[in-house]
Structure formats: C-alpha cells, structure tokens
Amino acid sequence: MKYVDEFRDGVLARQLSRAIASAMEPGRTYRLMEFCGGHTHAIHRYGIQDLLPAQVELIHGPGCPVCVLPMARVDHAIELAKRPEVILCTYADMMRVPGSPQDKAAQSLLGAKAAGADVRMVYSSADAVRLARENPNREVVFFAIGFETTTPPTAIAILQAATLGLANFTVFCNHVLTPAAMQAILESDDVHIDGFVGPAHVSTVIGSDAYAFVPQRYHRPVVIAGFEPLDVMQAIYMLVRQLNNGECVVENEFTRAVTPAGNVKACALMQQVFEVRNRFEWRGLGWLPASGLKIRAAYAQFDAEVRFPLVDHAWADNRACECAAVLRGRTKPRDCKLFGTVCTPQTPVGPCMVSSEGACAAHFTYGRFRDVRVTAE
C-alpha cells in the first residue's frame, strides 16, 4: 500500500508541476516567501524547487523561532543557568545556539552545562512543571520560545503551576507573534515579496483570518499550506493563479486543520496568561512593535524576568555570519562565506544552522547546495 501511495503522490506532483509551468506568464517572475521553517525543510527534502519553473523563486522567511531569537536573550538564559540555585529547562534546539563571545567557557547553554550549570533538555512545558515538583528546593526556570504554536502549552504550564502552588517555577518568556514579522518583511526595503505561503501549525492556532491585513493593507496574497510536499505545491499553484488573475486574498489550502478563527480555546488561554509587549527584538529584523508576548501581572510570580532581574547587553552578531540576511529573505544560505565550511550542523556559527527548522540546516542537510557548486565548476 505504501508504494501505491507513493506512486499516486508522484503522479499528482508531476501534474501540479505541469500545471504551475503552464500558468507562467512570459517574462514574469513569482517571488514567494515560505514563512515557516517547516515548509523550508519540506521544500529542500522533497526537491520541490526542482519541480518548479525558473520563474518561481522561493524565498526563506523568519519562520524559525530559534533562529529569530536575538543573542541578548540567549545570553540572559545562560546567565540564569549559571545561578547555582537554578535548573534551566529548554527545548533541544536552544541548547547549541551561540550567545555572545564574551564568555568563551559558556558561549551556549550546552557550554554552560559543560561548565557545571544545571541545564536540562525537555520535550514539553509539562516536563518543566514536573521538574519543579520533583525539586522543591531548586528554582526551575523554563526557557520558553516559539510562535503561537508553542504558546498555549506554556500558558497551561503557568496555570498548572498556579493550581499546584509551585513557588519554585518561573518562565523566561520569549514567545513571538507571526503577523508582526510578516508586516516587518512587507515594510522592509531589503526584498520584494509577491505572496506568502502561510504557516501551517501557527495557523491552526490563530486561524486564517489573522492574515487578512496582508492583502487588505499590503496587497499581497497569502495561501496557508500544510507540510506535505503536495500541500506546498498546491499552495504555490494557488498563489500563481491569484497573481495572474490580479486577485489578492487569503486562501486556505490546509482546510483539514485550519479554520478562519483558529483554535478559540488556545487563543483564550494565551489571552488569559500573556499580553503583548510594546516591542521585542528579532534577530535579522530588529526591534518590532507589538511582536512579542510577556506574562501578565496577575501571574508575575511565575515570570523569570520579575524574579531574576536581567541586565541587557548589546553584542553584535558575528560579522561573517549571514543569518540575519537569510531571515529577512535578502540572501540565500549558500551565499554566506561560512556556509558548509566553518559553519556546519556540527560546528554552527549562527542559529540558522543550529535549528531543525533553520534554512541553513535545510540547505546543508539535504545537499541542495552541492548541486549548485558542481554546476558552477
């Protein structure tokens, strides 16, 4: 049965490829940004770009939450981890993201762990709550990151800690908002975007209506897509058709999971526990207004930034690393001088090579850059 499904998918992929090619208008280019890092990996894993005509250019966006976190916030997490009373918990990708070069012995959370800090990888926010219950004499800090997808579980963890009366549990909140980043991209002079392949998981939470401002204010179409290769190709075809017809609306290819309003209960949880910050810093995009979340005053006892006052430092990113430009869609990973040489998944210089959703990791893992180099030679 597996081979029948693969054959069927292959037939459909060829049909979509031909349909997209037939829809091309002579002399026109279609610059489409896949906002989500999961889409970037699907594109490279399945060679979707190879199935598209040269007129369609896929541009990688800032859809990797690990990648867009600025160095200062990584430094704050390392600073928290080095406190002897703290157990710092976070997701696996954050363990190897480089912080500032000032502390060579602990330039990442993994380095801090090697130097003696109690840093633990968790699979969910519930794991962090469990650690707080099991270690009542330690301060357990959950280093929370992510877009709207991972925000509701963090809210649940805080509510659970409140119910359990956990006085030793706090959250270092770094949750950010997808629409604000899309707006920043559209208002940037760095790159021109004709349309967006909208994120899948985020959209299951916030719904398709959350992107209505993109066509209304910026006159760009959005098509929300699932993660399967056929989903992405269908979304590209839908975008091309909109552009050819002079249309500009939000369409939902991922109807099996995304609704106009999204997950109402999840959104209510976020609203209950979090409020929007006045501004938040994004790697590659700078300080964006109303783009991040903070814990409401009603739950301040679970806010690590309240319990452990942190001092901001302004360190510049590695000048040779192009992660910031990649996140803005201004350049491709293979254009970075460090890519595939100094910077690899084993020895990452920037977060786009660290994260499982990073564009540089996708280019390297699936070997697409090797074809370009062979051709050039």
Image (cartoon, rainbow, N blue to C red):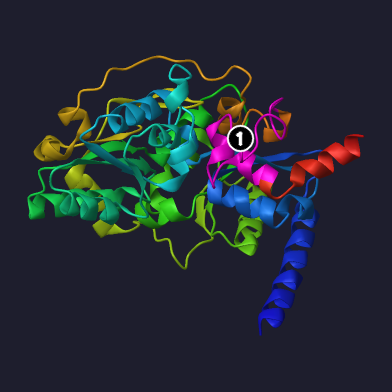
Task: Quadrant for the C terminus, please.
Answer: top right
Hey, which quadrant is residue 302 in on the image?
A: top left
Please report the bounds of the magenta region as a residue range.
336-364
Task: Check if residue 198 falls in the magenta segment.
Answer: no
- Relative to 239, is 91 on the left or the right? left
Percent of width and height locating residue 269: 22, 52
- Relative to 77, is 43 on the left or the right? right
User: Is 352 drawn above or below residue 314 in the view shown?
Assistant: below
Q: Residue at the spot x=61%, y=41% of the render? A: 345
Q: Is mark 1 on a helix, strand or loop?
A: loop
* Residue hosting label 1: 347
Percent of width and height locating residue 173: 28, 37
Task: Quadrant for the N terminus, please.
Answer: bottom right
Hey, which quadrant is residue 305 in on the image?
A: top left
The overriding secondary structure of the stretch rendered in magenta is loop
Q: Residue at the spot x=18%, y=54% of the render? A: 134
User: Which residue is farthest right?
Assistant: 377
Q: Residue at the spot x=43%, y=45% of the render? A: 211
Task: Check if residue 349 falls in the magenta segment.
Answer: yes
Percent of width and height locating residue 263: 32, 59
**Total numbered circles:** 1
Hey, which quadrant is residue 113 in on the image?
A: top left
What amino acid type is highlighted by mark number 1?
Thr
User: Is 310 drawn above or below residue 88 in the view shown?
Assistant: above
Q: How crowded is mark 1: few (under 14 residues within 10 Å), some or many (20 or more)?
A: few
Nearest the camera: 205 or 311? 311
User: Is 349 drawn above or below residue 47 in the view shown?
Assistant: above
Does the rendering let one see residue 182?
Answer: no
Percent of width and height locating residue 223: 54, 52
Nearest the camera: 347 or 62? 347
Does the rendering let one see residue 371?
Answer: yes
